[in-house]
Amino acid sequence: MNILLIGSGGREHALALKLTASPLCDKLFALPGNPGIGEIAENIEGISITDGEAILKLAKEKEIGLVVVGPELPLTEGVADVLTAGGVKVFGPSKAAAELEGSKVFAKKIMSRYNIPTAHCEVFNDAARARVYVRQMGAPIVVKADGLAAGKGVVVAQTVDEALDAITSMLEDKTFGEAGARVVMEEFLEGEEASVLAFTDGETIKAMIPSQDHKCIYDGDKGPNTGGMGTYAPAPVVTPEVMERVQKEVLDPMIAGMKKEGKPYKGCLYAGLMITKNGPKVIEFNCRFGDPETQVVLPLLDSDLVEVMLACVDGKLAETEVKWSSDAAVCVVMAAKGYPGSYDKGDAITGLDEAKAIGCNVCEAGTAMKDGVKVTNGGRVLGVVGRAADIKSATAKAYEGVGKISFKDAYYRHDIAHRALERLEK
Ligand code: AMP
Ligand code: GLY
């Protein structure tokens, strides 16, 4: 069948590699795709990724058998609803179900209703009341904008003053516009973070291999947050016992709860977790695959991704086997100097073929073609993925790949997977 992939980042490049590896995929189209994706798919320009009607028309024209949605925005805007109503199969939740990511208040309500472990919280739309609450609770405390804020709507305040500033900025200065019209004030959770992505058809939910993201820009998890500087899977902090609790206490009740609410959730559910000394607690849900988690999780999927996605769409996940490799994968993100602040674009990238020749996947995130040359075109330029029998050799492989690639002032972290390596050394 023909498949249409929506999105243009490293996550979508990882999806494209796996989709095109499926014997069920005759041809892959990408909207809009990127230069890396364009090497294995036909990129389509000129249609907005949130324009459901135009995407439906395109899907009919290209005889698309499955649409795979990468980013959250088309989902929270209801693209999956338009496609489903138009008779086109789509992997990704409806607008109502995507509210799990679109509104933190909604996610918190559902979690409380179905007893899913998460940080205690209070919701405020009034700054004066929020201030009283912060003074009462003290720090550390977490302040979150309700809506989508491009990953910037969370302030982990170490002091009361920091929390008060965040309240002023969100509720009074409207830094995030409507997305910050309500704030969630949350208990600070201590522990190690992990991501568990899961396939679901709305009835059955099957977890993928747990992974861990490195959000800070500098080695040692220092400096400002980024979209993710690297990932690895499996994450040993998620032991088989923890995984069992995640399935029973988080994933199963969530899917049953969403069904009961009349908002059955289909697609990939992303649970961002804090593994605390009392067990796993949910930090956030996302309605899509993680970026850059997908880059390390999907290479470990031994089953056919297209088959699994179709099972999710058709409500047949219970009888579909989802098999995983016992290998490990590590992704090191190469960024432009200055990111997550301002950075240059347009610098030539070399060595991509050399990295691929030693067996690495290279997932492009911020690249462009200029006069026939591949150049940098974003903060996070690309992710180099190494796969091997264990985390240590996968890390070595990823860094060997990084060593082959160069562009002006390329920046990357040198300690991706350090927590796993430390844990395994113990
Ligand atoms: P979010 O956008 O909700 O994933 O939050 C961004 C980051 O803030 C998370 O990855 C955590 O590192 C941190 N964070 C969010 N909520 C909490 C919490 N309740 N306790 C501790 N850290 C948190
Ligand atoms: N890696 C974090 C996210 O995808 O939201």
Image (spheres, rainbow, N blue to C red):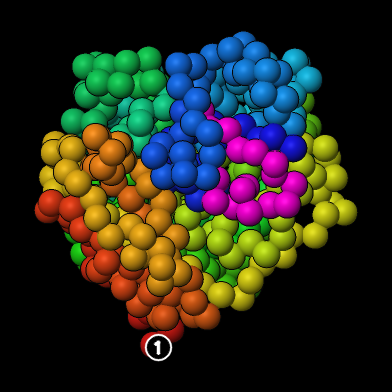
Q: Is residue 422 above or below residue 367?
A: below
The reply to whether residue 359 is visible in this rendering is: yes
Relative side of 213 to 204, left or right: left
Q: Residue at x 18, y 38 (%)?
A: 346
Q: Is residue 77 magenta?
A: no
Q: Residue at x 70, y 41 (%)?
A: 26
Question: Circle 1 is placed at which residue position?
Answer: 426
Where does the image place residue 326, in percent across and percent down from the top left?
61, 76
Q: Is residue 30 magenta?
A: yes
Q: Residue at x 24, y 55 (%)?
A: 350
Per the image, label 1 sits on a secondary structure element best described as loop
The quadrant in which residue 314 appears is: top right
Quadrant that contains the C terminus? bottom left
Q: Residue at x 35, y 65 (%)?
A: 355
Disc 1 residue type (three-letter): Lys
The reply to whether residue 420 is visible in this rendering is: no
Label count reads 1
Q: Residues within 10 Å of mark 1 (few under 14, many from 20)?
A: few
The quadrant in which residue 245 appears is: bottom right
User: Which region shows up in magenta?
Assistant: 16-31
Q: Is residue 254 above or below residue 195?
A: above
The quadrant in which residue 419 appears is: bottom left
